[in-house]
Image: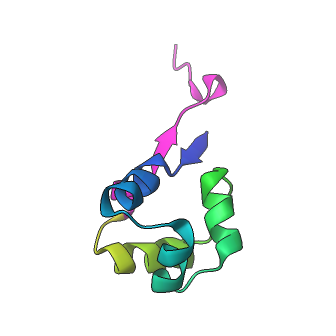
């Protein structure tokens, strides 16, 4: 499974915000923005800070992309 944050970066693009500007507003490190861009793991407190800064829910900024090995055969 992969978690991707494309929705977050679409929101920032729509708002005309640069990563560095948003990181400062949300109180997160620039390196965290890099992790988000790369789809790496971030802690839930970071997700909470992002959601507070954007007044949104986690599903508004991220989504789960299933891998082939996520398929469970109940047969």
Q: Is residue 42 visible?
A: no
Q: Going by the picture, which residue comes out furthest to the left?
A: 55
- In the foreground, 8 or 44: 8
Residue at point 38%, 73% (across, down): 51
Above or below: residue 36 compared with residue 72: below
Residue 14 drawn above or below residue 6: below
| Residue 27 locus on image (x, y percent) | 53, 86
Numbered range of the magenta stretch: 58-75
In-image side of 57 versus 64 (left or right):
left
Query: Which of the image's four quarters has the N terminus?
Result: top right
Please tell me which residue is depicted at 33% across the width and 73% down the height of the picture.
54
Residue 62 percent across, percent down from the top left:
45, 53
Q: Could you say which quadrant of the image residue 43 lies in?
A: bottom right
Count of numbered circles on the image: 0
Residue 27 makes an appearance in the image: yes
- Residue at (32% x, 56% y) in the render: 14
Whether 68 is among the magenta residues is yes
User: From what the image shows, is residue 21 above or below residue 15?
Assistant: below
């Amino acid at each position: 499974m992969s978690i991707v944050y494309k929705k977050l970066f679409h929101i920032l693009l729509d708002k005309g915000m640069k990563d560095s500007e948003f990181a400062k507003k949300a109180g997160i490190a620039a390196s965290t923005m890099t992790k988000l861009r790369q789809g790496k793991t971030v802690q839930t407190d970071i997700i909470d800070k992002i959601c507070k800064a954007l007044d949104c829910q986690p599903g508004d900024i991220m989504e789960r992309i299933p891998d082939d090995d996520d398929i469970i055969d109940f047969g």
